């Protein structure tokens, strides 16, 4: 059996798939798991940059598919954690360079050696979508709490079900609790009610994500970052632990007010 | 949203977003556009009027859903042979 294959997908682009893949992958590795992250966004690779491994790429997934290197040779080991590896995408090719059966074969080869294989998919529901989903045991659907993103996420739920794959689990990214409280943004509960799928985690909007991405040090490495904490919670849920959800309710009511008071050290 | 808007009973952006999504998704999921529903409604009216008196202007054809199941619902008030219609 070996590794569980987890594909991170979305309907709309730019909602945080790569950020989720890098951070959840790293969080799992920080917890002592053997993890490989595969960048399936052929032609627009980013996972290498978000993980800060871009300077160490020699071979990529297309080299593996074309038999120009062994699968192992395309894996880059992250030196910050014990067992995190990246299989980069090719930058100068397009989505058709890797077929669903190629992705299945690569995962079958890696499965015995790892605990988790995370696949970062490309935006959209064309060719690359099927390739990224083909080997998935679990699908994580990332969305933002916005009308357009949720609408496209719903389409993906339908497509995934039509493919006979298990119903995706939801990750709501970039939630702004303040806006929710003011009634200016969809809350997690609204998104959940509409999509009617299981929630795996909520990640708040966090400026440190952008800083971390630019630096190439995933935000999970920051002990105190709110997004980092949310990513660690997601990783623990994937490992089967029960971890309370970060919800916008955090900021509501007397309890939320007290919490904020404590956090800000007494000031308002 | 401002405190004043809330007092005026304006729906919040959050509520508006949720309602819009619900309507959009009902049509996306059923692959029935609002325009197509109008066409279906007119055809239902045409067929039924040949058999029973109906109040055409009060006919409603909508798509509803609970969880992920959609259904097409037609609400067709029957006309009274003696009075209305
Ligand atoms: N929780 C967050 N807080 C702040 N910024 C975020 C958060 N999550 C993602 N971002 C930012 O949003 C942008 C898009 O994220 P990312 O590249 O992960 O999306 P994607 O879904 O992989 O995009 P694409 O569809 O192009 O592959 C990035 O600049 C990232 O830093
Ligand atoms: Mg990406």
Image (tube, coloured by chain):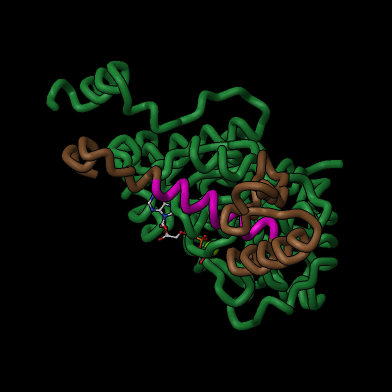
Chain colours: A green, B brown
- Left or right? Give the position of A106 relative to B67: right
Check the image and report above or below for A109 versus A200. Answer: below
Residue A245 at x, y percent in the picture: 50, 28
The magenta segment? B16-30
Closer to us: B73 or B8: B73
Which is nearer the eye, B15 or A2? B15
- Say which quarter of the image contains residue A156: bottom right
Up-down: is A58 above or below B48? below
Q: Is residue A8 visible?
A: no
Q: Please tell me whether residue A241 belongs to the stretch shown in magenta.
A: no
Q: Residue at x 84, y 56 (%)?
A: A109
Residue A136 spot, x, y in % from top left: 76, 52
The foreground one among B34 and B15 is B34
What's the residue at 39%, 40% (across, down)? A222
A128 in relation to A157, above or below: below
> Considering depth in this image, is B84 or A240 the residue closer to the camera?
B84
Residue A114 in picture, x, y percent from top left? 74, 45
Q: Residue furthest bottom?
A: A92
The residue sitting at 18% across, 37% down in the picture is B3
Report the label total. Answer: 0
């Amino acid at each position: 059996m070996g590794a569980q294959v987890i594909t991170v997908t979305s309907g709309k682009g730019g909602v945080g798939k790569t950020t989720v893949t890098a951070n959840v992958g790293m969080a799992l590795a920080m917890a002592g798991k053997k993890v490989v992250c595969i960048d399936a966004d052929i032609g627009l690779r980013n996972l290498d940059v978000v993980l800060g491994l871009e300077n160490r790429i020699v071979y990529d997934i297309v080299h593996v598919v074309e038999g120009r290197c062994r699968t192992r040779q395309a894996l880059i080991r992250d030196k910050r954690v014990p067992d995190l590896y990246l299989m980069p995408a090719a930058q100068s090719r397009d989505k058709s360079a890797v077929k669903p059966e190629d992705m299945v074969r690569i995962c079958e080869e890696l499965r015995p050696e790892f605990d988790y294989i995370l696949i970062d998919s490309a935006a959209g529901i064309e060719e690359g979508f099927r390739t990224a989903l083909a080997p998935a045991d679990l699908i994580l659907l990332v969305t933002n709490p916005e009308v357009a993103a949720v609408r496209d996420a719903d389409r993906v739920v339908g497509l995934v079900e039509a493919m006979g794959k298990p119903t995706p689990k939801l990750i709501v990214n970039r939630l702004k609790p303040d806006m929710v409280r003011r009634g200016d943004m969809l809350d997690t509960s609204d998104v959940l009610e509409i999509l009617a799928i299981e929630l795996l985690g909520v990640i708040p909007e966090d400026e440190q994500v952008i800083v971390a991405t630019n630096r190439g040090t995933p935000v999970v490495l920051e002990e105190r970052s709110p997004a980092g904490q949310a990513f660690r919670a997601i990783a623990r849920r994937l490992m089967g632990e029960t971890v309370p959800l970060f919800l916008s309710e955090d900021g509501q009511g007397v309890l939320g007010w007290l919490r904020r008071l404590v956090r800000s050290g007494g000031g308002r | 949203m401002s405190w004043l808007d809330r007092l005026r009973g304006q729906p919040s952006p959050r509520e508006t977003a949720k309602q819009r999504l619900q309507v959009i998704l009902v049509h996306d999921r059923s692959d029935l556009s609002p325009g197509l529903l109008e066409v279906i409604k007119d055809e239902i009216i045409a067929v039924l009027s040949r058999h029973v008196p109906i109040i055409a202007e009060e006919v409603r054809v909508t798509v509803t859903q609970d969880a992920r199941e959609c259904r097409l619902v037609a609400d067709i008030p029957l006309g009274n042979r003696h009075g209305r219609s």
